[in-house]
């Protein structure tokens, strides 16, 4: 429910409210599932996205890295959620002007996508 509210608020342009709802959702996920859970990592990624939009790049970077670490550990490197979070991190590096990290993450994402497309079910 909170996830739907976050998306609805964002679609209405109510970004500050969406960020607060995303933070509330993250707190609830941490209390319910703990810090090392896929749902918690998704919530961290969502908060990071809004945090980046508000210009707090260092906080967003730390959150994207946190989400990525948990997702890659629990879901695997080639999982779509893991790859999406890495893409968000690359986008952040682009905004920050860190071309070296941006290119490294893009290369990693391409390699993971290639690997995922060649895995057998």
Image (cartoon, rainbow, N blue to C red):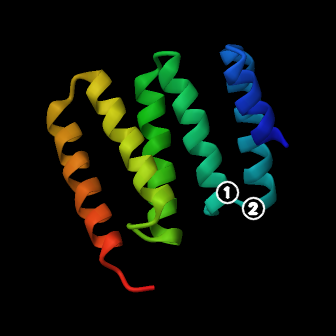
x, y (%) of residue 2? 81, 39
Which element is circle 2 on?
Answer: helix
The answer to whether residue 7 is left or right of residue 65 is: right
**36 versus 116 height, above or below:** above
User: In the image as oriented, which residue stretches furthest toward the bottom?
Assistant: 120
Q: Of callouts 2 and 1, which one flags the residue occurring earlier in the amino acid sequence?
A: 2
Q: Badge 2: how crowded within 10 Å, few (<14), some, or many (20+)?
A: few
The answer to whether residue 91 is left or right of residue 56 is: left
**Do the CB atoms of the residues marked 2 and 1 lie less than 8 Å apart?**
yes
Q: CA distance from mark 2 to mark 1?
A: 8 Å
x, y (%) of residue 107? 19, 52
**69 versus 63 height, above or below:** below
Instruction: Identify the image quadrant of the N terminus.
Output: top right
Question: For the point 31% across and 62% down, which residue is it?
Answer: 113
Q: How many marks?
A: 2
Q: Which residue is mark 1?
A: 39
User: In the image as oriented, which residue stretches furthest toward the left?
Assistant: 100
């Amino acid at each position: 429910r909170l996830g739907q509210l976050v998306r609805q608020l964002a679609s209405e342009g109510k970004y500050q409210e969406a960020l607060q709802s995303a933070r509330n959702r993250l707190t609830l996920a941490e209390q319910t599932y703990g810090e090392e859970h896929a749902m918690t990592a998704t919530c961290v990624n969502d908060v990071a996205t809004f945090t980046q939009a508000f210009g707090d790049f260092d906080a967003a970077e730390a959150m994207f890295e946190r989400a990525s670490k948990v997702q890659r550990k629990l879901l695997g490197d080639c999982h779509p959620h893991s790859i999406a979070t890495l893409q968000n991190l690359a986008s952040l590096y682009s905004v920050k002007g860190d071309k070296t990290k941006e290119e490294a993450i893009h290369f990693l994402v391409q390699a993971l996508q290639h690997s995922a497309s060649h895995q057998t079910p």
